[in-house]
Image (tube, helix red, strand yellow):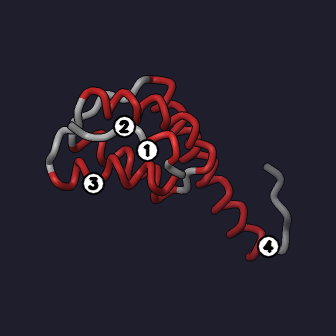
Amino acid sequence: MHSTCRIPTLNNIETSNAVWVFAKWGVKPSDAWLSAFLSHLPSQLLTMQPPEICSVLWAAAMMPLHLPSQVLDGLLLESQVSVFVIVCQTQQVSAGMQCQA
């Protein structure tokens, strides 16, 4: 059985890496671990950067893992925000402008 006691202490990078490693190794985590992970994941969404978001989405696709709609919506929204920021920063540099989010 996989330990769930440390999941609440994981930061955004550790959270995404934890689920990624299960998918990479082809090991299905226990139901208790998945439940704890899915409970913890929403608290990490606002701090996740594109690599962490990609890791979670890739792991969900490989396992396959059904992400609750609120979690999936949060991941996709954070992806959109990240893309907006990158585009804005690129335009700022090339045009000498400031973007407002």
The type of residue carrying mark 4 is Ala
Alpha carbon of mark 4 to alpha carbon of mark 2: how far? 49 Å
Of the numbered discs in the image, which one, if any, rests on residue 6? 1
Neighbour tally class for label 3: few under 14, some 14-19, many 20 plus, Cα within 10 Å: few
Mark 1, other Cα within 10 Å: few <14 / some 14–19 / many ≥20: few
Residue occupying image coordinates x 47% and y 29%? 39
Q: Nearer the viewer, residue 1 or 37?
A: 1
Residue sitting farthest toward the top: 69
The Cα–Cα distance between marks 1 and 4, rounded to whole angstroms, is 46 Å
Q: CA distance from mark 4 to mark 3?
A: 41 Å
Residue closer to the observer: 32 or 23: 32
Classify residue 92 as left or right of residue 36. right
Q: Upstream in the sequence, badge 4 or badge 3?
A: 3
Q: Which residue is mark 2?
A: 4
Front label number (4 vs 3): 3
Crowd tier of the residue under label 4, counting other residues whose Cα lies within 10 Å: few below 14, some 14–19, many 20 or above:
few
Amino acid under label 1? Arg
* Location of mark 3 (residue): 21
Q: Name which residue lies at 26% across and 27% down.
A: 31
